[in-house]
Image (cartoon, helix red, strand yellow):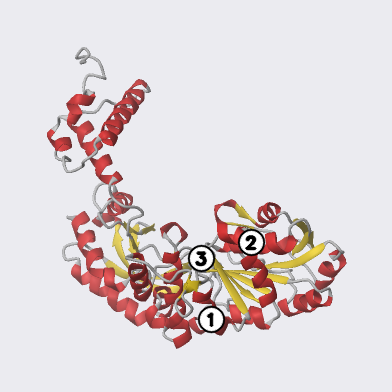
Amino acid sequence: MKVNNGSPFRNIPSVDSVLNAEKIKSLGFIKDQSFITEIIRSYLSNTRELIQKGAPSLEEAEIISDIYDQIIDLLEPKPKKIINAAGVIIHTNLGRAPLSESAQKSIVKVSGGYSDLEYDLLKGTRGSRHIHPERLLQLLSKAESAIVVNNNASALLLSLSTLASGKEVIVSRGESIEIGGRFRIPDVLKQSGAKIIEVGTTNRTYVEDYEDAITEETAAILRVHRSNFEIVGFSHTPEAEDLAILANKYSIPLINDLGSGCLINTAKYGLDPEPTVKEAINEGAHLALFSGDKLLGGPQAGIAVGQKIYIDQLKKHPLARAVRIDKLDLAALTATLIPYLTGNFEEEIPIWRMISADIDSLDKRAKRWSRNLRGIKSKVINGTTAVGGGSLPGQLLPTRNLAIPQESCGVGGTEKIAGLLRNEDTPIIARVSEDNILFDPRTILPEDDDTFLKNLKAVFS
């Protein structure tokens, strides 16, 4: 029902009016349209509430267009592919590590039909999903055994629940930390049923602090790599080998949570050395835990490698089923591990292609982009790329950014352009800095160059 012409509600159409609008009727290919009616009612109700609070009224055509856009957006599978030009390689908000081509193909292959996920093809009997990545992880880490779960938080929770529930776990006060998403080590210990015993101080902890805290109730020593921050200056952290000696002396396991879980020497790329999984095992860790989607460059996964006696216990714990990895991530993970075994990771794993890219190749790509943007003022400038993902805090790689200055961006400037780029069919996430909008070739996959340039030109046109 229409209200008087002076009312701010005068342009709000009825549900039936929206349903009969040509734009909405064009969605006739949708068999069950009951959800469309629900969206319309919800939108109109919200519109009335906003107008009551002082928001300006919309024209009927705008309302119908907004509703149509909401329906189309709802029917688009999420999350959507984006182009990362922001200069952070392992970008947590953007899905962390992009998968290799072989990992993508492996997912498609295993998802299109049945698989030997838990089937032994030789024996013709039930098998275990744990065996698929285990041999690869044994060879890469030199550990006796391995188990893969759905993320590293789960790997830690499973380890503590299995080995330390109802008992004490010793951790340095400087490692009793919070990482992304308010994920706190003390909270995980609490959920596992273990009691945290903090030793040392925030900046200095010694082996003697751990030994003084060991009692008959001590079930494990936990070492946590500070992967997303640094303590510098007057500080001390015991060596992993010394903690392993102490753990062996009292017959308790040393659990080393490595966070990112690097398999290679990062110093080769001008970065500070990141502890590798193989080093952690060589240093005596009974269990080493790490992520699959950070410096490993694979899918979300939590990986535990170490002594068979402890891994076997993890596999048998009831929680292992609740946090087990699914078949798609498992397919991607095994495909990601193989290039490390063959030595082809720089060519095949996207994050290592990015990290290992030389400055000359980055300069050539950025200059090629600039030449393609005819009529748009741009330049190529020096910049830096962060590794990101809670890995190598403070470590930056040199890069060459494509920079489009404020004066080329028109009304609204760089922030307006950045917003428009985020709303493209394939969104581009850029960085605004010092009156320039910046695009980092180190973090844009080469296979996305054409789409990147097409969308960039479309926004500026």
Estimate the x, y position of residue 380 in percent, counting from the top left. Answer: 31, 70
Q: Amino acid at mark 1?
A: Arg
Mark number displayed over residue 301? 3
Residue 338 point in image, percent of width and height? 44, 81
Q: Farthest residue toward the bottom?
A: 342
Q: Residues within 10 Å of mark 1 (few under 14, many from 20)?
A: some
Under circle 3, the secondary element is: loop
Q: In terms of sequence position, does the residue under pointer 3 or pointer 2 come before the other? A: 2
Gap in Å between the C-alphas at discs 1 and 3? 17 Å
Q: Quadrant of residue 305?
A: bottom right
Q: Quadrant of residue 2?
A: top left
Circle 2 is placed at which residue position?
158
Sequence-wise first label, 1 or 2: 1
449 to the left or right of 28: right
Location of residue 201 by image quarter: bottom right
Above/below status of 192 relative to 299: above
Circles 1 and 2, Cβ within 8 Å, touching? The answer is no
Element carrying mark 1? helix
Inspect this view and state whether residue 226 appears. no
- Viewport quadrant of the N terminus: top left
Coordinates of residue 54 in the picture (x, y in percent) = 35, 23
- Report the front residue among 41 and 69: 41
Number of the front mark, 1 or 3 = 1
Alpha-carbon span between mark 3 and mark 2: 13 Å
Q: Amino acid at mark 3?
A: Ala
Q: Judge by depth and name the residue closer to the eye, 140 or 424.
A: 140
Residue at figure coordinates x 44%, y 57% from the top left: 93
Q: Amino acid at mark 2?
A: Leu
Gap in Å between the C-alphas at discs 1 and 2? 21 Å
Q: Label 1 belongs to which residue?
A: 135
